[in-house]
Image (cartoon, grey):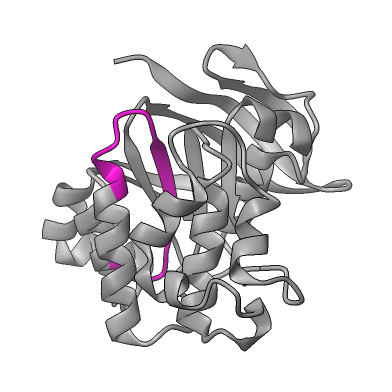
Amino acid sequence: MADILRLESVRAGYGGTVILEDISLTVPEGGALAVLGRNGVGKTTLIRTLIGQTRLHDGGLWFDGTSIAALPCHRRAALGIGMVPQGRQVFASLSVEENLLVALRAGPWTVARVLDLFPHLAERRRQRANRLSGGEQQMLAIGRALVGNPRLLLLDEPMEGLAPVVVEHLFEVLRSLRGDDRLSIILVEQYARAALAYAPRCLVLERGRIAYDGESSVLAADTDQLGLLLGASR
């Protein structure tokens, strides 16, 4: 299976400050990767580096065989990289349907398909986004990314601040997306055990470097190493 994403020896950060050091990884087409780590180790910086929101100091990034190191955010999005940002960032003054329509690109994911995936949103399609619950706003953020018909979906802590019942529902949704061999997923998440159960491979960051890169099942079974890398994990 070909790799949809490849990073080699990436050093990146903000301005002159380097946050990520020597990051090399691959994601296969249709694959899922969990990115874990304590707070402040560079997880969000990694996602922002992939979408083009940081300064690349060294190394290379390739998406579907094309170098994207010098491409701005909108060019990367046009190639097929979609993002669900931390904090949702839905358009508060727009309705559910309008939030989806502004991001719509040609492809198998349509507004109707997203509303089928999230019946709660279908019931509120005319409602403004700022009147939705936190869980509904996260559904909308995921749906908005999907209607852009990405080939690689980046999710930055989508479960943050949500009730456990909503977290379980969203993981069910993500599991259904994992069955689409046209869509690759990188999930940054604090719910470590749920993320390890979701993605067959995981990456753990520590102080901006890769501390673990391997099978999720192996790390999940090694309680001592899991605790060492992540501390008390949910």
Residue 14, image x, y percentages: 81, 50
Left or right: 154, with 196 as reference point: right
Left or right: 140, with 29 as reference point: right
For the point 28% across and 72% down, which residue is it?
169
Give the quarter of the image for residue 7. top right
Residue 114, image x, y percentages: 43, 55
Vertical position of residue 22 compared to residue 230: above or below: above
Q: Nearer the viewer, residue 103 or 26?
A: 103
Left or right: 230, with 67 as reference point: left
Vertical position of residue 220 compared to residue 64: above or below: below
For the point 30% across and 59% down, which residue is it?
173
Vertical position of residue 66 compared to residue 164: above or below: above
For the point 49% across and 36% down, which residue is it?
152
Regarding residue 56, the answer to whether it shows in the image is: no
Residue 137, image x, y percentages: 54, 75
- The magenta-colored residue range is 177-192
Query: Quarter holding the C terminus?
Result: bottom left
Residue 73, image x, y percentages: 76, 38
Give the quarter of the image for residue 70. top right
Regarding residue 17, the answer to whether it shows in the image is: yes
Q: Nearer the viewer, residue 127 or 30?
A: 127
Query: Quarter holding the N terminus?
Result: top left
Q: Nearer the viewer, residue 228 or 164?
A: 164
Q: Is residue 178 magenta?
A: yes
Q: Is residue 188 magenta?
A: yes
Give the quarter of the image for residue 79. top right
Vertical position of residue 49 compared to residue 95: above or below: above
For the point 58% across and 36% down, which residue is it?
81
